[in-house]
Amino acid sequence: MNLTERIAYIRGLADGLKLDENRDEVKVIKAMIDLLEDMAYDVVEMEEVVDEVCNQVDEIDEDLAEVEEDIYGDGGYVSYDKDIDEFSDDEAYYEVTCPACDKTTIVDEDALIEGGLDCPYCGAEIEFDFSELNEDIDALEEADKKADTKAEDKAEDKAEEK
């Protein structure tokens, strides 16, 4: 039994009592029943509005899920606007700027290793060229070897002096 049916039942009970309409108590009871009936209709209207809003929110949620799939899909990239706290501490992330649209995207290490990806904003291909980086790494390793050799030579010289 819903609210309006319950109020109708109470009204029927009160009418069945055949109370004297001129008594003040009866007037109060009838006014209270009228008030309850009005409130019940208002509640029913609000429930209908809430149901409609819930349906709209569900539709928005479904649309948002589609947009998230388009943006965050399996492309190896995430939106630049993503809150930094949402990134895993276990993975390294890098900012990459698209040469076509100049928008920045955050990518994970896997996307870098693959050598490129499509820009999530304009669709242009972003390629990663590590040749200069490899040359720099080789130069640093060579400088480290020279420094180690010098340090060893100095240590030997000091040991011979003693």
Image (cartoon, grey):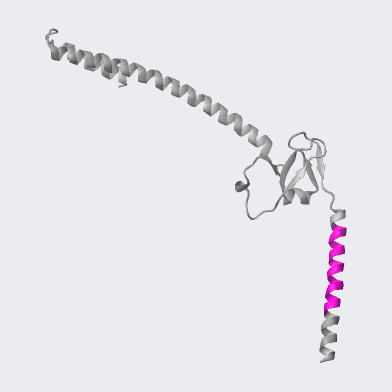
The image shows residue 135, relative to residue 18, as above or below, that is below
Question: Toward the viewer: 55 or 87?
Answer: 87
Q: Residue at x 83, y 75 (%)?
A: 148
Q: Residue at x 12, y 10 (%)?
A: 23
**Residue 112: where, in percent of width, then height?**
77, 49
Q: Residue at x 87, y 54 (%)?
A: 132
50 relative position to 88: left or right: left
Q: Residue at x 73, y 51 (%)?
A: 109
**Residue 110: where, in percent of width, then height?**
73, 50
The image shows residue 65, relative to residue 42, as above or below, that is below
Asked if residue 140 is among those painted magenta in the image, a careful observer would answer yes
149 relative position to 43: left or right: right
Residue furthest bottom as drawn: 162
Magenta part of the chain: 134-151
Where residue 31 sits, quadrant-wise, is top left
Q: Look at the magenta stretch and give its main secondary structure.
A: helix
Question: Toward the viewer: 87 or 58?
Answer: 87
Where residue 3 sits, quadrant-wise, is top left
Where residue 101 sits, quadrant-wise, is top right
